Amino acid sequence: MIRPQFFVFAGLVSLSLICSQTLAADAPASTPPKEEITAALPVIPDAKFNLTDFGAVGDYQADNTQAFKNAVAAIAKAGGGHLMVPAGTYKTLPFVLTSHMDLHLDPGATIKAPDTFAEYGIPDPNEPLPEGGGRGGFGGGRIAPLISCPANTTDLAITGSGTIDGSGAMFWIWSDKAARRYPPGRRVVARPVLVSLSGVQRLHVDGITLTNSPMFHLVPRGQDITIENIRIVAPSDAPNTDAMDPGGSRIVIRNCEIDTGDDDVALQSGSHDVLIEDLICLHGHGISIGSPTRNGLYHVIVRRISFDGTDNGLRIKSYRGNGGEVHDIQYSDITMKNVRRPFDINMLYNGNANTPTDVGPREANGQTQAIPNFHDIHVTNLTVTRSPLAGRILGLPELPANNITFTNVKIQANRGFLVQDAKDITFDNVQIEAVVGDPLVTDNAAVKWNGTEKTGSSGGSPVPFY
């Protein structure tokens, strides 16, 4: 069930994304924005099917993979219906859903992945191999998601108050990210996604808990997607355990609590018409756009979000060679505390290079293709307390970030706000209390700071912000 604090939420969240060039092309940037974004719900027949009627046993001893497959086949043959999963813990290997289907988890029901490599048919990485291991050569290809669906699925739901558990701990210690802490040759086991639902029209995910995914928890891609009242939880140091990586159009996300080891929400390239509201984000990397932005993103609304202890708050990131146009992004009524970097626009993103900084080379070095172009981004009613850094905007010398506004903002931080390679940046009724240095540092920037024009470079070195 949703925790009691969820009921303080006031509004509705709609998240609309498009994840392919084809989808991105059907709504050009000149399309007038809509006042609100809604998503059509799936249409599912009333027929009910009980998982135990197909031989399932909820003792976490029996393998229920075939029971799930047989139940889904029966629903497909009947033209759709609700698969009821009663209380119990149902061990299963990956299985695939079908159109016009609701996977419904009753109270106390858990669908749980195996917790040994042997059950996946993967050799124990602790044991020596005759020809050694090493990156890319151990454990075979990536395992299928625990729950997935075919392309072009329509009218799909996962509902109820139960839990889907990915048993991810055994994968985390053998991940490619963990291997960075070891000498070269450390074995790597490819990790599965927990729930991956791509190419769906009309998807509804409601009420459930997702936890301990080996990698990403929920990857919904398509059109008319509603995600509401769910909870996603993994340890804060669990690698790459993104809560949601949505893409598509007309996607609604509301009243969710997220506490994971990577992005809380990561919007995918090609997305537009996005509304995210009334979320609680605890550990994680915040609400992100990018880093691939080649197909562009626009008309994104993020409002009434509470961040506490996240690594980032609001982040837009990309880099030369995989960038595109990101514009019409609106953030409002945001509160943050104990957030390492509350606001971050980084057009020089280099976060996957395993270096001490996530900032890549400032100069173009001949890279002229697929350059990030970030503009028309607006922040209103933002309150930040106890942060090391107020924020930063890192544009490109050849294409500055531009037309970015902050209105009614109050930030308490150890260090102020950097604006670099940017123009038409406006701070209006903004208070930044910086313990060290100036509240605003500029480097090749044109800024209006509470009515005062500032151009060029001022306030000190930008290096501490890298």
Image (spheres, helix red, strand yellow):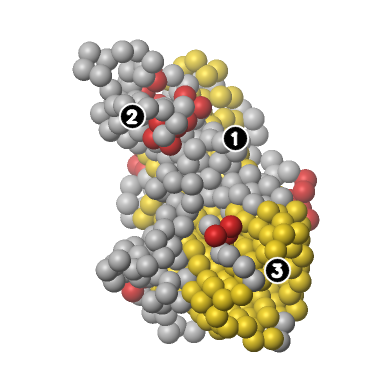
* Quadrant of residue 283 within the rendered picture: top right
Mark closest to the chain's N terminus, 1 or 2: 2
**What's the distance in space between the residues labelled 1 and 2, CA to CA?**
26 Å
Q: In the structure shown, which secondary structural element does the residue marked by tag 1 occupy?
A: loop
Residue that badge 3 annotates = 439
Residue at 21 percent of width and 17 percent of height: 131
State which quarter of the image contains the N terminus: top right
Disc 2 versus disc 3: distance between alpha carbons? 43 Å
Q: Look at label 3 and name its amino acid.
A: Pro
Q: CA distance from mark 1 to mark 3?
A: 34 Å
Taking the image as drawn, is residue 33 in sight? no
For mark 3, give the secondary structure: strand
* 151 is higher (above) or lower (below) than 146: below
Q: Amino acid at mark 1?
A: Pro
Q: Quadrant of residue 221?
A: bottom left
Tell whether label 3 touches label 2 (CB within 8 Å): no
Q: Which residue is mark 1?
A: 235
Q: On the image, numbered disc 2 is attached to which residue? A: 184
378 above or below 337? below
What type is the residue that disc 2 sits on?
Answer: Pro
Where is residue 291? Give x, y as percent. 43, 58
Q: Residue 403: percent from the left, percent from the top?
A: 54, 81
273 with respect to 77 (left or right): right
